[in-house]
Image: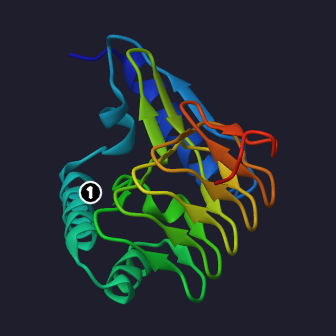
């Protein structure tokens, strides 16, 4: 059972999330919570929001297995993602079902097979929410993971199976876990 103080804190955090969502230039939002309430209390205040979230998750799951990129683009746009012209989304790409509207895919970018874009993270004590932008003409390699709050610059390349936890400069190639910029001497065979 939650106390009056817990209820006030949950309501304060709900307001904080709403304010953050309305500011497209905001840095990632981190909310600390304790044993008395969890992120679900902030994100899904009632049954209607739980049902809506489950339907969104189902649509994201369906889009993930559809082989045609053009069909995926239509579904993701319906869910609020900002998707430019000529974007290609490979099969089995995992888009965060919680907040797909926080993802922007600019013109002509490519998401490789099985890559993952997560706009939220949960730890034992924190909830993090951040926007993801994949710049025009960029390529996110197969099975790579993009963390919340990351911007991949225009014309950048994320190598196969990389974990990107910070911004990628325009035109750069990043590889590894965590991803690091290739400096040109490491060979680009």
Question: Which residue is painted at 53% across and 31% down in the image?
Answer: 177
Q: In which quarter of the image is the N terminus?
A: top left
Position of residue 100 measured from the top left corner of the image (x, y, whole percent): 44, 61
| In the foreground, 146 or 104 | 146
Which type of secondary structure does the marked residue at label 1 adopt?
A: helix
187 left or right of 122 in image: right
Above or below, 75 relative to 40 = below
> Badge 1 is on which residue?
53
| In the foreground, 114 or 25 | 114
Badge 1 density bin: few <14, some 14–19, many ≥20, Cα 10 Å? some
Position of residue 152 measured from the top left corner of the image (x, y, whole percent): 68, 56
Question: Which residue is painted at 44% across and 80% down in the image?
Answer: 77
Q: How is the image coloured?
A: rainbow
Position of residue 103 measured from the top left corner of the image (x, y, whole percent): 54, 62
Q: In which quarter of the image is the C terminus?
A: bottom right
Position of residue 145 measured from the top left corner of the image (x, y, whole percent): 47, 45
Residue farthest top in this picture: 35
Instruction: Give the tally of numbered discs.
Output: 1
37 left or right of 119 in image: left
Question: Which residue is painted at 68% across and 74% down in the image?
Answer: 137
| In the foreground, 49 or 106 | 106
Residue 176: image quadrant is top right
25 left or right of 145 in image: right
Above or below, 70 relative to 106 = below
6 left or right of 67 in image: right
Question: Which residue is painted at 24% across and 62% down in the image?
Answer: 52
């Amino acid at each position: 059972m939650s106390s009056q103080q817990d209820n006030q804190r949950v309501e304060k955090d709900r307001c904080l999330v709403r304010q953050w969502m309305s500011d497209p230039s905001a840095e990632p939002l981190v909310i600390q919570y304790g044993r008395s309430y969890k992120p679900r209390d902030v994100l899904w205040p009632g049954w209607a929001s739980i049902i809506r979230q489950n339907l969104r998750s189902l649509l994201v799951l369906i889009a993930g297995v559809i082989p045609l990129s053009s069909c995926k683009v239509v579904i993701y746009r319906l869910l609020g993602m900002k998707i430019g012209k000529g974007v290609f989304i490979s099969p089995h790409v995992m888009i965060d079902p919680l907040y797909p509207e926080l993802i922007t895919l600019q013109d002509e970018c490519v998401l490789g097979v099985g890559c993952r874009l997560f706009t939220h993270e949960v730890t034992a004590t924190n909830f993090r929410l951040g926007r993801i932008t994949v710049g025009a003409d960029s390529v996110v390699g197969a099975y790579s993971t993009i963390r919340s709050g990351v911007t991949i610059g225009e014309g950048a390349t994320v190598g196969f199976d990389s974990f990107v936890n910070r911004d990628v400069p325009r035109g750069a190639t990043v590889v590894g876990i965590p991803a690091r910029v290739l400096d040109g001497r490491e060979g680009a065979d």
